Image (cartoon, rainbow, N blue to C red):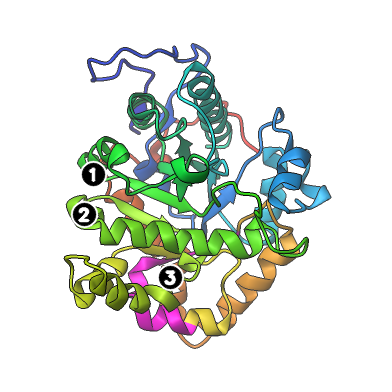
Amino acid sequence: MKLISDRKSNSNTPLTTKPSPKLSPSLSPAAILAHSSIKRIDVHHHYFPSDLKKSKANSKIGWKTPEGNLPWSPSTSLAAMDAMSIDLSILSFPPIPSGSIGKIDRASARSRNEYAAQICRDHLFPVPRFGFFATLPFLDDVEGCLEEIRYTFDQLGAFGVSIASCYGEGKSAKYVGHETYLPIWAELNRRKAVVFLHGAQVPSSTPYPHEFLGIPVTESPNETLKAAAHLVVTQNRRIYPNVKIILAHLGGTTPFLACRVAVLSNHMGCALTPEEILEDFKTFYYETALSAYETNLLAIDSFVEHDHVLFGTDFPAVSRDMSNWYTNNLEMHYANDKIKLQRIMRDNAVKLFTETTNNPLSEEDTPEKEQKGDHDNY
């Protein structure tokens, strides 16, 4: 089986944060996904390091992470995954839109990525249970982000990167299609990388309208649309077509408002025609976390091909019961079309992640062919 060793980056740019000598080799994403027993893949599954002050973060965004999920550990997720028949979860740290350029944010991203990678290593056998999306430093730190992409892809076996919809505060905030970030998109495009895009509101004096309507409830879905639309109307979706972008929560309001963006942004001067704008919106991938309900699923059915729909839960930010409510709706909606359901639950994710240039799978690179030995497992 092909392993990813802790080798030197092929870039001439030196690492400012040294790799941990304790890290053991990783499986490539393609090798993990080749395991025949993986039937259900959750592409929207968070992790919370033990040093994360989650109560403070919850207060800031207006959300209550279920008490039973804190403090979080891999066993918290494994118990929920087993209960929901999820074989593999792609871990991501909730992206943070604020930050600064410097060693602190770089070190924080590196620490989170090595933590996530170690979780994946600890749960490879007998069946791989986790992959992870890399966390990047504050996105304005372009060199730091490029360095972290190289390290996490080439040495840690990341499935892709996770980014917020925008970065910065107030008038200085920038959406992810901003020209500042184009070198990052160019590198991701070169690698044919997967990007998990999660909505995050620009900090303001009125962050959310009501205590029952915190940022995750109403703001994040709309921010996802705004980021997707920004990538489209700036033509960066076309300039970097090899990047596969997953929009969280079925794209938020994207399936409903893409047609509005198409005509009105063209009127405002966008060089793309309404038809071209809609075509670009349909290149995104849409995952089902907290969004699988009949009206939404009917909309996505008519908006994109089924190979662009993926399964997600948003656990452990939400309870197992909340995740199950949406998963049950998803299963009922496709009860008479088991082929489409299987594609959403597994096949589309396998195809998406194995098409990247990050550690392509050779014929012998399957977990079943690994030599047996003593390994950590859950």
User: From which residue to which does the magenta span run?
Assistant: 298-313
| Along the line of sight, the residue nearer the viewer: 199 or 156 | 199
Which element carries disc 1, helix, strand or loop?
helix
Residue at the disc numbered 1 = 189
Residue 57 located within the stretch drawn in magenta? no
Q: Residues within 10 Å of mark 3 (few under 14, many from 20)?
A: many
Which picture quadrant has residue 291? bottom right
| Mark nearer the N terminus (2 vs 1) | 1
| Mark nearer the N terminus (3 vs 2) | 2
Residue extending farthest right: 67
Where the N terminus falls, by quadrant? top left
Badge 3 amino acid: Thr
Badge 2 amino acid: Pro
Which element carries disc 2, helix, strand or loop?
loop
Which label number is shown at residue 254?
3
Residue located at (71% from left, 41% from top): 57
Where the C terminus falls, by quadrant? top right
Q: CA distance from mark 1 to mark 3?
A: 23 Å
Q: CA distance from mark 3 to mark 2?
A: 19 Å
Marks 2 & 1, CB-CB < 8 Å contact: yes
Which circle, 3 or 2, is nearer the viewer? 3
Q: Residues within 10 Å of mark 1 (few under 14, many from 20)?
A: some
Which element carries disc 3, helix, strand or loop?
helix
Q: Position of residue 265 (x, y in %)?
A: 29, 70
Left or right, 318 with respect to 168, comes to right
Residue at the disc numbered 2 = 241
Q: Position of residue 338 (x, y in %)?
A: 46, 80
Residue located at (62% from left, 41% from top): 47
> In the image, is residue 254 above or below residue 31?
below
